[in-house]
Image (spheres, rainbow, N blue to C red):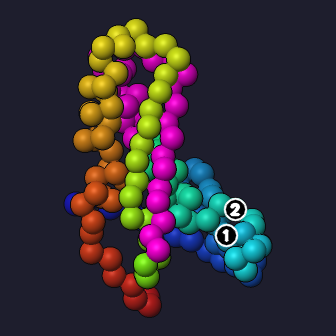
Amino acid sequence: MPELSITLSQQGDTAVNGKLGDHSVTIDRPVEKGGGNLGAMGGQYLVASIGGCFSSTFFAAAKSRDIAVEGFEVEVLAGLSEQLPKRFDKISIKASYDSCSAPEEFGKLLEIAEKGCIALNTVKGGLPVTVEAR
């Protein structure tokens, strides 16, 4: 079974730097939450990951159908629960475009992106998580 492994290493007092293939990201907390504001918060990356995965899946679906879309934009809204443990309790995705060569197919492309996005399917289905020292 394929796996995805990412290692995060401490960067300063409150941040970590993650190596993601040829790319890297810094994750931290804002100063008002005790961090150094060296990068976005982990929750922001989670929401961005959902939007990025959804978008790339959308683009693949459009390309495979020879549908040209310009000015595609996705807004991912994540509601934060009031209950403990803190978590996102709802996510909604709103998508728009400036031009589409087949506007009647836009809704179908959104459905395909929703069904094919690994990040979104993971959040929708939940999964077991373990935490342990190595």
* Mark 1 vs 2, N-terminal side: 1
Return the residue nearer the eye: 114 or 93: 93
Residue 49 can be seen, yes or no: no
**Residue range corresponding to the magenta coloring:** 53-82
Q: Residue at x 47, y 74 (%)?
A: 82
Q: Residue at x 30, y 25 (%)?
A: 107
Q: Residue at x 77, y 73 (%)?
A: 31
Instruction: Name the outermost residue toward the top.
Output: 101
The residue carrying pointer 1 sits among few (fewer than 14), some (14 to 19) or many (20 or more) residues within 10 Å by Cα, namely many
Q: Residue at x 44, y 32 (%)?
A: 95
- Cα–Cα span, label 1 and label 2: 5 Å
Amino acid type assigned to the residue bearing label 2 in the image: Gly
Establish if 68 lies above or below 62: above
Amino acid type assigned to the residue bearing label 1 in the image: Asp
**Mark 1 touches mark 2? (CB < 8 Å):** yes
Q: Position of residue 90 (x, y in %)?
A: 38, 58
Q: Secondary structure at mark 1?
A: loop
- How many tags in the picture? 2
On residue 28, which mark appears? Answer: 1
Q: Position of residue 92 (x, y in %)?
A: 40, 48
Return the residue nearer the eye: 79 or 48: 79
Instruction: Name the outermost residue toward the bottom.
Output: 133
Establish if 70 lies above or below 94: above
Residue 51 can be seen, yes or no: yes
Can you tell which quarter of the image residue 65 is in? top left
Return the residue nearer the eye: 36 or 1: 36
Q: Secondary structure at mark 2?
A: loop
Q: Position of residue 119 (x, y in %)?
A: 36, 53
Quarter of the picture containing the C terminus is bottom left
Circle 2 residue: 39
Establish if 80 lies above or below 134: above
Residue 127 horizontal side relative to residue 13, left or right: left
